[in-house]
Image (cartoon, grey):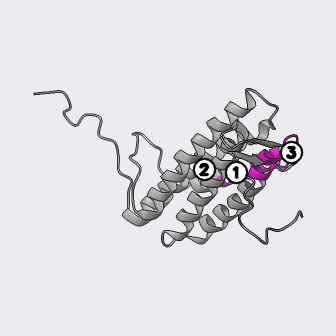
Amino acid sequence: MGNRLSKIYTRTGDTGTTGLGDGTRVAKDHPRVEAYGCTDELNSAIGVVLASGEVPEPIGACLTEVQHDLFDLGGELCIPGSEVVSAADVERLEHELDRFNESLPPLKEFILPGGGAPAAACHMARTICRRTERRVLNLASNEPVNPELVRYLNRLSDLLFVIARVLARRDCGQEVLWRHDRGRGSD
C-alpha cells in the first residue's frame, strides 16, 4: 500500500490538475478522472442505500462487497494499464442478480423510481452507475481500458435495479408502476 495522507490538502491541484496513481498529472476534467470520480460517487450512493434504513442482511452484505469492488475499480481507473476487476467479479454479480431476482414476479410494466427510502436510494445509485458506465466507455474510446470494467458496471446497474425492486416490495408491498395510459394529451 502506498503512502497514507497525513495532510488532506496538498495545494497541487490548485491549478486544475490532479495526479494519477502512476504519478502522471492530468486535468481534473480528463476522461479518466471523470470515470473514477463517477465511480467514487457511485460508491457513495451505495453507502446511502446502506444507511437509508433497514436493508436485509443478504442485500447489505452484497452491497458492501460491491463497495469494495468499486474501490478496486476506481483504483484501476486511476492507474493506467492496471487490471484488477476480472470476469469472476462479473460472474459473482450475475449470481447475486439471479438470487435476488428469483423471488420477484416478472416485470410487465415499467416501474417508477421510489418505493420507500432504501429503494429510492438504490434507484439513484442505479442511475449513477449508468453514468459511470458511460464515462468509462468514453475513456475507452480514447485509451485502453479493461473490458471487464464495462461488463461489471453493466451488471451492477442491473443488480441495483433488482435490489431496488426487492426493497420496494419489502417496504411498500409493491412497486410503483408507470401508468402510460393516464390520459395525457386528451382535452
Q: Where residue 124 sits: x, y (%)? A: 49, 52
**65 or 168, nearer to the observer:** 65
* Residue 83 belongs to the span the image colors magenta: yes
User: Tag 2 or tag 3, which sits nearer the N-term?
Assistant: 3
Residue at the left extreme? 187
- Name the quarter where the N terminus is drawn: bottom right
Q: Which residue type does callout 1 highlight? A: Leu
- Report whether 116 appears left or right of 10: left
What residue lies at 83% left-to-right and 68% top-to-bottom? 4
The residue carrying pointer 1 sits among few (fewer than 14), some (14 to 19) or many (20 or more) residues within 10 Å by Cα, namely many
Tell me where the magenta segment starts and ends, as one range: 73-96
Q: Where residue 76 sits: x, y (%)? A: 81, 48
Label 1 or label 3, whichever lies nearer to me, is 3
Tag shown at residue 93: 1
Tag shown at residue 83: 3
> Is label 2 in a helix, a strand or a loop?
helix
- Report whether 131 appears left or right of 8: left
| Whole-number angstrom distance, CA of label 2 to CA of label 1 | 7 Å
The residue carrying pointer 3 sits among few (fewer than 14), some (14 to 19) or many (20 or more) residues within 10 Å by Cα, namely some
- Name the quarter where the C terminus is drawn: top left
Q: Which residue type does callout 3 highlight? A: Glu
> Is label 1 in a helix, a strand or a loop?
helix
Q: Are marks 1 and 3 in contact (CB under 8 Å)?
A: no
Q: Where residue 55 sits: x, y (%)? A: 53, 69
